[in-house]
Amino acid sequence: MGLALGAALLALPTSTLALAREFDVAGGALKPALDTFIAQSGVQLIYKVEDVKDLSTRGIKGSIAPDAALDRLLEGTRLRIRRGQDGAMVLIAPAERKP
């Protein structure tokens, strides 16, 4: 079960997610973009590698709140964010509906 864990030593309080930070995350494959986002934001982010495989992002550059930056990175994907009270975020891939 391939899980990637955001390597944040401390979970950030939810209020910290509202403070703008500088981001420079290149567009392209989503997994390396998420890893860069984690490093630049300090946010604890958990996702399944298989959920982000073959997905891409337009990237993000500039001063923006981490939660808004993540929303932009995920634009156009089926992934959704579940936020915990401890500040950690989990990416969820909704089950695909069968016709």
Image (cartoon, rainbow, N blue to C red):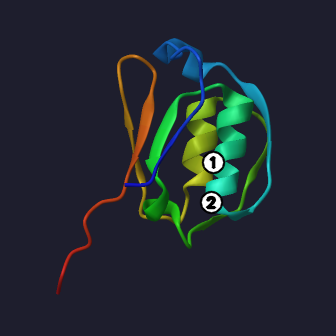
Q: How many marks?
A: 2
* Image quarter of the N terminus: bottom left
Regarding residue 67, the answer to whether it shows in the image is yes
Label at residue 12 = none
Q: Residue at x 35, y 18 (%)?
A: 85
Q: Quadrant of residue 16?
A: top right
Residue 76: x percent and y percent?
A: 53, 66
Rounded to the nearest angstrom, the CA distance separating label 1 from label 2 is 6 Å
Residue 67: x percent and y percent?
A: 55, 34
Label pair 1/2, CB-CB below 8 angstroms: yes
The residue at which mark 1 appears reads as: 34
The residue at which mark 2 appears reads as: 30
Residue 83: x percent and y percent?
A: 39, 31
Q: Residue furthest front?
A: 1
Asked which secondary structure carries label 1, the reply is helix
Q: Is residue 23 above or below residue 43?
A: below
Q: Is residue 61 above or below residue 7?
A: below
Q: Residue at x 66, y 45 (%)?
A: 35
Regarding residue 64, the answer to whether it shows in the image is no
Q: Residue at x 65, y 36 (%)?
A: 38
Q: Is residue 77 above or below residue 2?
A: below
Asked if residue 28 lies left or right of residue 17, the reply is right
Which amino acid type is shown beneath numbered disc 2?
Answer: Leu
